[in-house]
């Protein structure tokens, strides 16, 4: 069973956003699997970089939708995005410097953050997008 399952309740009813969320879960699972298989620091760094890049791309997609539709929650929503990107960059730096080991705690943090953000924050955005 995969580490992070993109369950039906995480599907918000917006094709583009749902598709990107599913891909994010896949990237999290890829990182988890690499960790489980004892991949090298170099390999893990590559997957982590991909996860960060894809996350930024996804956040930009949502932020464009927010701006284009005058979404009233844009500031708070974008702040949550910025906060995660900052934390992932910090993880990446510490991992690269060897001062942190990627662990199940880190994986659980990523998974929980995503699930919570999708259920609460992204859901409000999709409701807004779909009622226009
Ligand atoms: Fe979001
Ligand atoms: Fe999202």
Image (tube, helix red, strand yellow):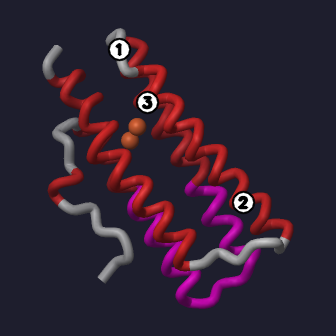
> Is ligand 1 closer than 8 angstroms to the Cβ of mark 3?
yes
Residue found at x 72% / y 83%: 40
- Side of 113 relative to 46 (left or right): left
- Side of 53 relative to 5 (left or right): right
Distance from label 2 to label 3 (Cα)? 23 Å
Looking at the picture, tell me which residue is in the foreground, 89 or 121.
121
**What element does badge 1 sit on?**
loop
First in residue order: circle 2 vs circle 3: 3
**What element does badge 2 sit on?**
helix
Residue found at x 37% / y 21%: 73
Quadrant containing the C terminus in the rendered view: top left
**Residue 104, image x, y percentages:** 53, 78
Query: Is residue 37 covered in magenta?
Result: yes
Quadrant containing the N terminus in the rendered view: bottom left
**What element does badge 3 sit on?**
helix
The kind of secondary structure the magenta stretch mainly shows is helix
Residue range corresponding to the magenta coloring = 24-51
Q: Answer yes or no: do the residues labelled 2 and 1 have beta carbons within 8 Å?
A: no
Q: Which residue is mark 2?
A: 92
**Residue 20, image x, y percentages:** 37, 46
- Among the 4 quarters of the image, the one containing residue 129: top left
First in residue order: circle 2 vs circle 1: 1
**Residue 82, image x, y percentages:** 58, 36
When the figure is inspected, residue 87 is found, relative to residue 59, above or below; the finding is: below
Q: Which residue is mark 1?
A: 72
Looking at the picture, tell me which residue is in the foreground, 45 or 131.
131
Q: Answer yes or no: do the residues labelled 2 and 3 have beta carbons within 8 Å?
A: no
Q: Which mark is residue 58?
A: none
**Residue 67, image x, y percentages:** 42, 14
- Ligand 1's quadrant is top left
Q: Residues within 10 Å of mark 3 (few under 14, many from 20)?
A: many
């Amino acid at each position: 069973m995969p580490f992070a399952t993109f369950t039906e309740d995480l599907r918000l009813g917006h094709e583009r956003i749902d598709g990107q969320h599913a891909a994010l879960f896949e990237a999290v699972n890829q990182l988890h699997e690499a960790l489980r298989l004892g991949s090298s620091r170099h390999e893990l760094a590559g997957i982590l970089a991909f996860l960060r890049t894809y996350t930024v791309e996804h956040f930009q997609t949502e932020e464009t939708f927010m701006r284009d539709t005058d979404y009233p929650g844009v500031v708070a929503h974008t702040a949550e995005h910025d906060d995660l990107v900052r934390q992932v960059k910090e993880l990446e730096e510490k991992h690269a410097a060897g001062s942190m080991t990627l662990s199940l705690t880190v994986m659980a943090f990523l998974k929980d953050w995503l699930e919570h953000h999708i259920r609460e924050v992204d859901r409000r955005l999709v409701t807004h997008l779909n009622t226009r």
